[in-house]
Image (tube, rainbow, N blue to C red):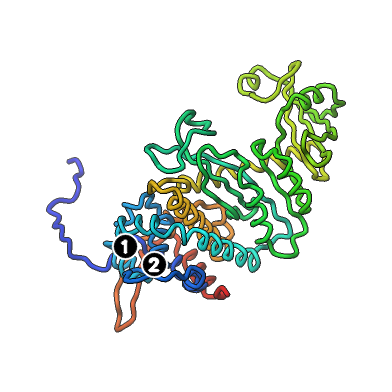
Amino acid sequence: MPRTGAKNVQVAFSAGRLTHFGGVYLLHAFLQQLQIRTFLSRLLRTPERNNHFSITERLFALLYPMILGLEKIELSALLGTNGVFQYLTGLPRFPNPTTLRRFLVGKSDELLPKLHAAHNALRAQFLAVSFPASSICLDFDSTTRTLYGNQEGAAKGYNPHHKGKKSYHPLICTEAHRKECLGGALRYGNAHTAAGVKEMLREVLALLPRGIRSLRTRADSGFYDGDFVAQLSQNGVKFAIVAHMTAPVRHKVPGLRYQKVSNILSTAEFPYKPHDWDKKYRFVVLREKLTEKRDEQLTLFKSNAYSYHVIVTNLPLTPYGIFTFYEDRAGLERIIRIAKDDYSFGTAPTNNFKANALYAELSMLAYNLVVWFKFLCLPDNWQSYTVGTLRHKLLLIPGIFTKTGNRPSLKLPKNCLYQNEFLYAQKRIGKLKPLV
């Protein structure tokens, strides 16, 4: 006889104290041990009257859904029905979506600069206490977030994937080794790629701890800007920035003396001072023989069966070494994709630009909280995991909440595959010191 499933199963909606977010207790314990909510409350103090929720309660009501993968503010209402989640996270009640949207719109003018400063203060603290390297590599880039509707600030501009569509054009700076976001800002869709980058660089440099012996920066051709390059040079930052193929550069590169790297690649370099720049800089060239397959894909300058890639730099590396260093910047694309897909960075939950900028700042804070939690609390072989993997393996472990005597108890599955990692993180959390 064919096998059949279970029959005559009685279903009853009577079980209490269940949660799908058992593992979120670890994240809560991490935030609690460091007293991050107290830290933010001190810096975000804002006078209010007759409000059922404090500033930090509303902020964390937006942060937790981002971390748990509830992409839209409407989905945060699911957490309002989970009393165990509220108990574990210290939220006595959960604001409804309308309350959260009104909060973003009503408080953005006052709260955005305060939250940005508080986020920078957190960045500085975590860099100071936990950064293991004497070398820091900053990657700058912009991205686009296509929008549909009439949101303030949405405009037609640089949008390579959806040409002609309205979008936002955020700017981002990340640290290449530990993958944390050291700067992120929402901008109008018609903003120039490098708009605001000098201010962001100034802020990021102020965050860095003393003792950094090597500070390097990479950026694509959108940041080929004389003022930005001069700022990097004046601050002792080594850089590799893709150069624009202007007419003078195109005229120079074919006639240079090239050194062979392989049967396809060769390199050269030349000093050059672009118009309105402060001085001459070193330009390095990678010449690549065109093949039939590659020729279809290349959009760079081509001449006489070669393509040319040019970088302006002050790094003391060989020309090919500079291109190798720049190619490692590809990891930034993954970070941006994670920020946009997993944390809703650059979305428009309201029609108000400043409110959306506040939401973008929160999404970057959510991203960093997970990076810091992972770095300080999880085993080495978990450091490469994305937040999606962490949700699956740790944060969304189901559990049941009970009380024995007068003591609360969170019971997780007996056959949990990641019990050792959970206990490891719990032990590491207990050793952390509160932020000052």
Q: Secondary structure at mark 2?
A: helix
Which of the 4 quarters of the picture holds residue 90? Answer: bottom left
Q: Looking at the image, can residue 30 be seen?
A: no
Q: What residue occupies the far right of the structure in this picture?
A: 257
Could you tell me which residue is drawn at 70 percent across and 23 percent down? 301
Could you tell me which residue is drawn at 41 percent across and 48 percent down? 352
Image quadrant where one finds the N terminus: top left
In this image, 251 relative to 302: left or right? Answer: right
Image quadrant where one finds the C terminus: bottom right
Q: Is residue 282 above or below residue 397?
A: above
Q: Secondary structure at mark 1?
A: loop
Q: Nearer the viewer, residue 50 or 303?
A: 50
- Percent position of residue 303, x then y: 74, 18
Residue labelled with disc 2? 57
In this image, 314 relative to 207: left or right? Answer: right
Residue type at numbered disc 2: Glu
Could you tell me which residue is drawn at 68 percent across and 62 percent down? 132
Q: Which mark is residue 95?
A: 1
The reply to whether dot 1 and dot 2 touch (C-beta < 8 Å) is yes
